[in-house]
Image: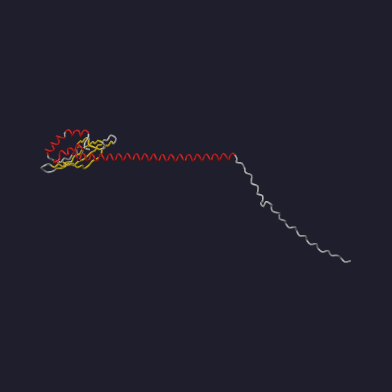
Amino acid sequence: MSGTTKSPKAAEPEPEDVAEPPDPDGAAEPDPAPESRPPTRGRTARAARALRARRTAVAWAAALTVALLLAGYSAWSYADTRGDGALSYGKARDAALAAGTRGVARLNTVDAAHVARDLDDWLGVTTGPLHAQLTRTHASDTATMKAAATSTRGTVTDAAVTELDTRAGTAQLIVTVQVRLTPAAGTATTDRKRFEANLSRTDGTWKLAALTAVPIGAS
């Protein structure tokens, strides 16, 4: 009896993975969004405090800026006013000094050939009591100087303002004068004098109101 040999059974092929058909809509479903958590009371309070702090800081910054601007303007105004006052005072002092110097020199100058003219000039640089006195003695002074026939010429060598009141319009000077006397006959001589001059401002012009002789060497 012959044996029957069974042929080996062929291995069955494993089934291949079959791809799922695409979504008919052509788009994959999005992942679900994470749940948003409502803000807590603590976070809301902190945000409110931060907002108030920012507003307060802005308000303080604005106030500080305004204060600095006002302070700067006030300082500038004060400096400007002070500068104007000093400038005005300086101009008044210079004007009084110049007028006093010219006036004292004029009152010590007479040309024997033009006595009347020069004494009229005396009246032009004076005011107040001194002007009134020179007006009263004008005629007699003219006659006396014509008779003397002596010419004098005054030159101011030193002058300084010792007092000045711009509101009252008064000033005081100390003035040193060199006077050259030239007689009609003889040798000319030179004399040195010192005066205390009081000035008054009249119609914006400084004029001599009083003139007092001061001994040389007196302080």
138 relative to 88 in the view: left or right = left
Closer-to-camera residue (25/114): 25
Q: Quadrant of residue 20?
A: bottom right
Closer-to-camera residue (15/215): 15
84 relative to 185 in the view: left or right = right
Q: How is the image coloured?
A: secondary structure
Q: Quadrant of residue 117?
A: top left
Count how many numbered circles sit on residues in the image: 0
For the view shown, which residue lies furthest in the bottom direction?
2
**Which quarter of the figure is the N terminus placed in?**
bottom right
Residue 71, compared with residue 24, is above or below; it is above
Task: Give the percent coordinates (x, y) of residue 100.
Answer: 23, 39
Task: Give the percent coordinates (x, y) of residue 186.
Answer: 10, 43
**Which quarter of the figure is the C terminus placed in?**
top left
23 relative to 139 in the view: left or right = right
For the view shown, which residue lies furthest in the right direction?
1
For the view shown, which residue lies furthest in the front direction?
25
Task: Give the percent coordinates (x, y) of residue 157.
Answer: 21, 43
Task: Give the percent coordinates (x, y) of residue 144.
Answer: 13, 36
Q: Quadrant of residue 156?
A: top left
